[in-house]
Image: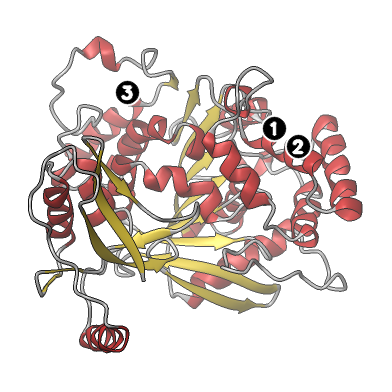
Amino acid sequence: MITFTVAKKNGNQWLELGRSFGHFFSPSAVVTDDVVVKDRIVAATIVAAVAGSAPSPLLCTVAAVAVGSRCRLDRQRRRRHDRQRRHRKIPRATTPEPTAMGDSSDSVSVDMETIYLGGKEHIIRTGRGSVSVIVYGDQDKPALVTYPDLALNHMSCFQGLFFCPEAASLLLHNFCVYHISPPGHEFLQLGAAAICSDDPVPSVDDLTNQILEVLNYFRLGAVMCMGVMAGAYILTLFAIKYRERVLGLILVSPLCKAPSWTEWLCNKVMSNLLYFYGVCGLLKECLLYRYFSKEVRGSPEVPESDIVQACRRLLEERQSINVLRFLQAIDRRHDITDGLKRLKCRTLIFVGENSPFHPEALHMTAKLDRRYSALVEVQACGSMVTEEQPHAMLIPMEYFLMGYGLYRPSQFSDSPRSPLSPSCIAPELLSPESMGLKLKPIKTRVSSQIRHSER
């Protein structure tokens, strides 16, 4: 159990999460005044009330939506909790007496459960090796399958998007999320074990066939897919091979061609670094250049951003042989441009303006059927839009999912950034240019589809 502490310090309330980067905490229940509170909105309200402020939408979102879907403690957990309290003589958390705002000693402890993105990890044995899948949400909902980029897993690749309250409410309200990690990239407390060097290096076709086996294992039909860079290539290839199993594609800085000479040279440098030196400093710089724009990577005058520092720390946990094997698979990929013309599922592509894969995303968009695809270019952003500017994905995703009859829950629809609610600010402030976006017409296309469906 992890303790969240809501405290007052120097006149300002702050919430000490007490967590390391890469962990989510689920408020399964809040114990206060001998009462087990099972509803997360109520839990968020209690926490906010103790802190002396109204429950903000962000706090309610994180408590109610962004970190899990099951909201109760079963009897066995309560009995175990009571036994631990008796043995350790831990007092129940109680609400302190109201004090002045300037006091720094008042606090209340709330018990939280430590989990992986609010879900359960499954290790699935396939004909091409074991695959880690973390299932998050109600499995009766439609499935959203994610696949990360090189040397990343779902926590380091999609955490920024799922921590964005509005995007999290949109996705978690409509989908059960299946986070698939490449072999050897799974998220474990002690890190993934190194894969035996004698095992054959999987091809990109092997990786797509693993996805098929994962869907069959969970008895899933057609799914929505979201991938980043190399993960976008794997999911696009899967959609080409198994068109009946894909409802739609949300791709971030996707690849579709064989490696260019520049990428091939960079991959060879990284392969040699991994083989001889492991995950060294120079390799991290190569990967960070692949992921982020120079604005967040920093310079001698400007320190690098928090997301880059966190990503740098997470890269240290990677096994070099596992990263090398995935890199070799991606480096040997084949051109799938011809297969793009056969795709009939809707495709939404995001790409950062400063991404090294920006030309490839434009090429892919040109080859897709214009009736079913849209491109969103995000200004001042690198390849990993999900981490660097996740808020820029909200409005395009909302319009995209409206075509499937999916909407954000009503309790979160009052945001001025939501196209599903009446705007309370000037329309010119919501223009794509003012939000740092270049939209290759997406609003008109989606809106015309909606009008056609209404007829």
Q: Secondary structure at mark 2?
A: helix
Residue 272 point in image, percent of width and height: 90, 47
Q: What is the C-alpha distance between the residues marked 2 and 3?
A: 39 Å
Amino acid bearing label 2: Cys
Q: Residue at x 7, y 50 (%)?
A: 98
Q: Earlier in the sequence, mark 2 or mark 3?
A: 2
Asked if residue 127 can be seen in this view, the reply is yes
Nearer the observer, 227 or 37: 37
Query: Please, is residue 1 above or below residue 251 in the view?
Result: below
Tag 1–tag 2 contact (CB < 8 Å): yes
Q: Which mark is residue 444?
A: 3
Q: The N terminus appears in which quarter of the rendering?
A: bottom left
Nearer the observer, 270 or 439: 270
Query: Please, is residue 130 above or below residue 428 in the view?
Result: below
Instruction: Sort mark 1 into few (<14), some (14-19) or many (20+) by Cα contacts within 10 Å.
Output: some
Q: Which residue is mark 1?
A: 289
Is 296 on the left-hand or right-hand side of 24?
A: right
Is 140 on the left-hand or right-hand side of 219?
A: left
Amino acid bearing label 1: Tyr
Is 80 on the left-hand or right-hand side of 375?
A: left
Query: Image quadrant of residue 192?
Result: bottom right
